[in-house]
Amino acid sequence: MQGESGMKRGVITIVAVGALAGPALAGEIKRELGEVVVTSSRIEEQRQDSTATIEVIGQDEVERVKYRNAGEILQRVPGVLTSNFGGDEELTSIRVPTHFTNPYTLVLIDGRPSRTYGSGGVNFREINSANIERIEVVKGPASALYGSNAIGGVINLITKKPTAQPQVTAWGEAGEYDEYRGGAYASGTSQSLSYNVDFNFKDRNGWRENTESKRQAANIRLQHFTAGASIWTFNFDYVKFDNNTAGSLDEQDFNDDWQQSYHTFANVEMEKVAPAISYATDLAGGDFDLTLGYRRIDHVVYPGYSFRPVFGDPNVQALSTYSDIEGYDIDLQLLYARELPSVESQLVSGLDLQTSKHEAEVYNLAVTRDPVSKKYTSYTVTGLRDSYDIETDAAAPYLQLDRRLGDNLKLQAGARYDWARYDLTDNLLGTAGMEGKQSFSRLSPKVGLTYNPLPHLNLYGSYSQGFVVPTTSQLFTSRLRNPDLDPEKADNYEVGLRSILLDGRASVDLALYHMTIREKIVDVTTGPFTSEYRNAAKTEHTGLELAADYALVAWARLGMSYTYAENKFDRFRDAGVDYSGNWLPRSPKHRLNLRLTVLPYEGFEVELEMDEISQQYADNANELTYSRPTLFNLRAAYNWQSWSLWAHVNNLADKEYASYVSESSTSVTGMGLYSGSPRTFFAGLSYRWGGNG
């Protein structure tokens, strides 16, 4: 098997490099059972007290990887799959294979939602990635605390906090294909005020046709500490990008020239402004937090993400759309946590509220395509297709109780009740099925246990429910819309262990899970050339996830992430074909990520990373297969006094590969492939004024 042999070669290569390294300083194991996390319970707790599977990418790792897109760093978390489509366009999923319209993963920024309630899939392009300090990934349904979309899990991006000592850092980076990144940030604390100010930019031409992009981002964070031990925090986030999109290629064209693109004018523009204010204080013997956030996003897609072929018209070869969407979200979060010493318990309660309004105009485009090169060369706006306003309101109280049942045993139970309402107004008063109101409600419980039989061994098990409300696109605005859709529902059973071994030289995290998703929303054929979304499938998801670190010797350490996942249709029929028992598309059974880090001498660190995934299917029928080659990345960094230098080579072996595959009705072989990235070198330099060291 190509995938299996590639995996074996990768392991041998990683180990061989470790044998050639020279002596220097001590390697370190970063995982600790007592590490403080905040996402699994919405308050600070030790990782060993969490009944959920949680992975942490710490500040050191974020700084070392210096990722340019989410996939570069999240691929080292077992259970996470990421696909990059060029520039800032990407798709990320936890445990459940996803598509653009299936939002199974919830992304938070400092615990706050990054998108509108019930909106589409994860999109890191709307996030100021240079301002991220650490990442927490909670796997499995988290609807008991976070509501809809958290079936696969939650990714919480925790931003940089102000430093104790004033400091200013400037940095710059240059890479192949005319890619440049840079920025500056200042941070510090003065008496009762602390601050963090960040600005950064990115400009790239792209290695592939029509992948140019520009991006600017800024963040201001101010904290005021009152005499009564209360904390006021003001945060302002700004992101703007302009990203050309290359799209997928037919399999034959991909094999002939994976650098080409059919697109010559496809583009996505976005501007986000997001201020927020929070207040934290002691109240009646407990901790009270209030956060009020506002988020405004203007989003233009030119043209839409898909083209529909037209037959019989010599002047028009395809149809598409141009979308202009603008709107706002207002979020209010209330949280109260209190210790109950008399019963050895802790109570966490809260209320999440959101209201939003978005206005959209969608225009029809007649697109001309060159029959020889297959490129979409020009377009004509033929008229306004849709004009609508969407209002969304959501409210969700939640409650969680932690109860000590002894020195080493803890029970955790909780639930959240979600209510959400969509109200769509058709401004054209004539689009069939466009106008409508829909509301949903759902109670999501969870219960779990943690047990510490030994000082360095932590066991846990849990049962949790999750749900996903239909998106407004699935209900009202897409060509496949169905206003009668119900939420998807999930039941998840999970057990795991966390352990520190060999006197702290090794750590192991192991999780086993089984999840069932009922009333899954899928595209169902309703007639010749017609289809619609329906709650027509049931899927089963079973997996094993392993994360381990090992200090090989004093100057080298090895990190490993392994995922075994079976994601299959338990029940699904479409157009007379029974897909029950088939694998879900884009669902590899195995994924292995290995990282060897050596420290030749003080301040100098080198990391070699290998990433391998097994064969996957591109279609429901499991007739279209794709095997991605093994990828290697090499990173080196040197820190001396206030200077930092780094150099990275991604895709070290310069393999041609697809980052995402799908079924394509216009492809001769039936499969469309999104090109990954070739071997790419980039290097950077930073200097810090002030601070410690």
Image: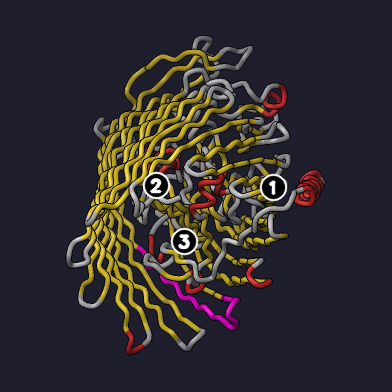
Find the distance from the CA under tag 1 to the CA under tag 2. Answer: 30 Å
Regarding mark 3 in the picture, which secondary structure is present there? strand
Q: Nearer the viewer, mark 1 or mark 2?
A: 1
Find the distance from the CA under tag 2 to the CA under tag 3. Answer: 14 Å
- Looking at the image, tell me whether mark 2 or mark 3 is earlier in sequence order: 2
Residue 246: percent from the left, percent from the top?
A: 54, 26
Q: Which residues are magenta?
A: 442-459
Q: Which residue is the extreme one toward the top?
A: 315
Mark 3: few, some, or many residues within 10 Å (few <14, many ≥20)?
many
User: Which residue matches tag 1?
Assistant: 613
Overall secondary structure of the magenta stretch?
Answer: strand
Mark 2: few, some, or many residues within 10 Å (few <14, many ≥20)?
many
User: Which residue matches tag 2?
Assistant: 471
Regarding mark 2 in the picture, which secondary structure is present there? loop
Q: Quadrant of residue 39?
A: bottom left
Identify the colour scheme used. Answer: secondary structure
At a point 50% along the width and 10% down the height, the residue shown is 315
